[in-house]
Image (cartoon, helix red, strand yellow):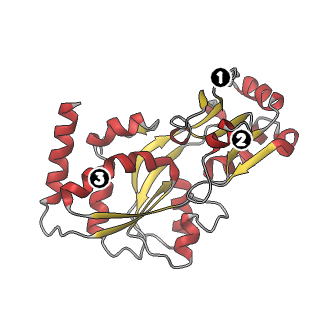
Amino acid sequence: MLRHLACLFAFLVAIALAPGATAADIKVMISAGFFSVYKELGPAFETSTGHKLVTTRGPSIGDSPEAIPARLTRGEEADVVIMDGVGVDLLDQRDLVRPGSRTPLAESFIGMVVRAGQPKPDISTMEALRKTLLAARSIACSDSSSGTYLSTIGFRKLGVADEISGKTRRVRGPPSGELVAAVVARGEAEVGFQQVPELIHVPGVDFVGTVPSDVQPPTLFVGALPKSSQHPDAAVALLQFLSSAEAAAVITKAGLKPLPAR
């Protein structure tokens, strides 16, 4: 750990001493899946570079007015966005991000939780997951990318979409909403599905595992620069830091998979 921290400090000093680097207020829009990594590493980035991170949270997609695409579409400013790749694809379609600015940060997977102390059902195969969904009294999933995928594709692949539609609840996420696991912890849903980093550190639930690969969409959390970015150099420095080898341990602890060094 000491070696890891030393490498991290050296990396940040290199950023801080880069030619032409000046302190800036970096406006960051970020979704929940990568937030724990950002929250842990952000203070070190600020201390070592002099930059200040001004954070706005919102879902990667969805019909919430707090969703990052909705915020940018109505003119809210950001220097950098951190969200899942589906959300960045949407921003690309709306011509809201700078071409070539996409930076992959980590790979993520959809998982399931139950209320703490309850039996953990088998979801290791497609048939086992199908039986678990049919047997569950109530199901919760997010109103962002993972929940949208499950409700429109995943549950249909499993052949249960119609059977479970009446007992499935879509949960609006932070900042005005909450994580799916919080709903399960209160007993308002028997099982809950969301990206693993949004499940594993929530009190009152037990993590069951990830869904089978046949209903596991390839999901990357990425950073990108909106066309409105006023501090592109500082934003790029932040993304370089969050995607560095030195950040891998924090990414892993958050329930994400670090990407190979580029």
Numbered tag placed on residue 154 in the rendering: 2
Q: Residues within 10 Å of mark 1 (few under 14, many from 20)?
A: few
Q: Residue at x 60, y 28 (%)?
A: 206
Q: Quadrant of residue 177?
A: bottom right
Kindly identify which numbered label has been placed on residue 117: 1
Residue ID at (19%, 55%): 48
Could you say where residue 254 lies in the image, as x and y percent from the top left? 43, 38
Mark 2: few, some, or many residues within 10 Å (few <14, many ≥20)?
many
Total of numbered circles in the picture?
A: 3
Q: Position of residue 260 (x, y in %)?
A: 34, 39
Q: Nearer the viewer, mark 3 or mark 2?
A: 3
Residue 94's place in the image compared with 61, above or below, is below
Give residue 51's quadrant in the image.
bottom left
Cα separation, mark 3 vs mark 2, equals 38 Å
- What number is the disc on residue 43? 3
- At label 2, the amino acid type is Gly
Pick whichever of labels 1 and 3 is earlier in the sequence. 3
Q: Is residue 254 above or below residue 34?
A: above
